[in-house]
Image (cartoon, rainbow, N blue to C red):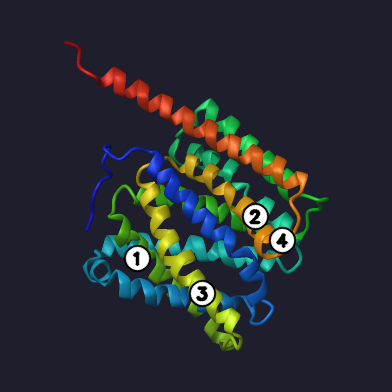
């Protein structure tokens, strides 16, 4: 089931859909931290993406059964990049503070336009460059409290590169395949890969109600729904804009920590989050002006 994106759908709705996805991902940080104290990280990934694969197969069974070999190939490539990013990030977290990890991972806001230039010779617009730098500065203010560079940071940076490649390739593939089909094949492949990594050492079964609630939440909302939203959004907006919008994830993680974790609202949160929001607004306004200019120039004269 392949289709090309229609230009009748504006870019605001996909951007809002992507913000909803990052809100869900941001809300999962405290859950991940708590669940991984109960079971090993690889087992956590196996449960999380294994359940996601099951839910996806049940919800999108028609798309799964009708998916072409090309759609499964796309899903396999994307799954390798995403699971690889999750695995490398998890290894890095063993020696890197979560705040530092969040900053290095968020560097995909800068690396995505660089990769687009290197791989596809696609130069970013000046506004996009400025927005990427401002978003990264916001991440630094929000996350950093001292910084050193060791093996953990190297693993985390490698994971961030995988995230950037995932954004770049998803942007290419989502314009060649139906969004629900591509999301389905990707999520099922992610489940198989994660279970394959976790299985050799045996998979620990969670034993608390909270862990099971968190796993189901992350599988249904953080997996099936959020990945479908990202895939659909990337069929309609550029990879660089996606990377900038996704820098809101640590902002929503901080907000969730304030609401549910009893943490305080700090100047770091206000200033860092404000810069990230400003970067997104600048990127959206630039794209809106470009779309308006294109619309005017393409209107036939009387």
Residue 37: name its quadrant.
Answer: bottom right
**What residue is pinned by disc 3?**
48
User: Which residue is at 73% across, 56% downward?
Assistant: 99
* Distance from Cα at disc 3 to Cα at disc 2: 23 Å
Q: Residue furthest top?
A: 302
**What residue is pinned by disc 1?**
184
Could you tell me residue 108's position as x and y percent? Answer: 58, 47
Q: Are marks 1 and 4 in contact (CB under 8 Å)?
A: no
User: Which residue is at 26% across, 41% downward?
Assistant: 6
* Label 2 crowd bin: few (<14), some (14–19), many (20+), radius 10 Å: many
* Distance from Cα at disc 1 to Cα at disc 4: 30 Å
Query: Which secondary structure, mark 1?
Result: helix
Counting residues from the N terminus, which is met first, the one under dot 2 or under dot 1?
1
**Is residue 46 something one can see in this rendering?**
no
**Is residue 299 something one can see in this rendering?**
yes
Counting residues from the N terminus, which is met first, the one under dot 3 or under dot 4?
3
Q: Foreground: 87 or 58? A: 58
Counting residues from the N terminus, which is met first, the one under dot 3 or under dot 2?
3
Looking at the image, residue 265 sits to the left or right of residue 162; the answer is right
**What residue is pinned by disc 2?**
255
**In front of the other: label 4 or label 2?**
2
Residue 273 position (above or below residue 44): above
**What residue is pinned by disc 4?**
98
Q: Are marks 3 and 2 in contact (CB under 8 Å)?
A: no
Query: Which secondary structure, mark 4?
Result: helix
Looking at the image, residue 135 sits to the left or right of residue 64; the answer is right
Could you tell me residue 238's position as x and y percent? Answer: 43, 40
Query: Which secondary structure, mark 2?
Result: helix
Counting residues from the N terminus, which is met first, the one under dot 3 or under dot 1?
3
Q: Which mark is residue 271?
A: none
């Amino acid at each position: 089931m392949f289709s090309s994106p229609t230009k009748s759908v504006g870019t605001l709705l996909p951007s809002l859909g992507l913000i909803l996805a990052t809100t869900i991902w941001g809300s999962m940080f405290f859950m991940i931290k708590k669940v991984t104290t109960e079971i090993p990280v690889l087992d956590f990934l196996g449960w999380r993406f294994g359940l996601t694969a099951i839910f996806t197969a049940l919800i999108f069974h028609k798309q799964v059964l009708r998916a072409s070999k090309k759609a499964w190939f796309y899903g396999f490539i994307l799954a390798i990049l995403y699971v690889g990013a999750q695995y490398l990030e998890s290894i890095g977290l063993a020696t890197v503070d979560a705040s530092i990890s969040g900053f290095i991972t968020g560097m995909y806001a800068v690396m995505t336009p660089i990769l687009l230039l290197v791989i596809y010779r696609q130069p970013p617009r000046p506004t996009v460059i400025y927005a990427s730098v401002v978003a990264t500065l916001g991440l630094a203010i929000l996350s950093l409290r001292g910084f050193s560079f060791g093996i953990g940071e190297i693993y985390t940076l490698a994971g961030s590169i995988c995230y950037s490649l995932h954004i770049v390739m998803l942007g290419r593939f989502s314009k060649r395949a139906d969004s629900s089909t591509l999301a389905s094949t990707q999520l099922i492949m992610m489940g198989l890969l994660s279970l394959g990594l976790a299985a050799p050492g045996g998979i620990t079964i969670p034993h608390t109600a909270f862990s099971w609630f968190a796993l189901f939440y992350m599988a249904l909302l953080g997996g099936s729904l959020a990945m479908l939203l990202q895939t659909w959004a990337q069929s309609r907006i550029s990879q660089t804009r996606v990377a900038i919008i996704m820098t809101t994830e640590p902002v929503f993680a901080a907000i969730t920590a304030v609401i549910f974790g009893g943490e305080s609202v700090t100047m770091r949160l206000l200033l860092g989050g404000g810069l990230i929001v400003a970067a997104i607004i600048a990127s959206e306004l630039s794209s809106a002006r470009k779309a308006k200019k294109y619309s005017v120039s393409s209107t036939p004269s009387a």
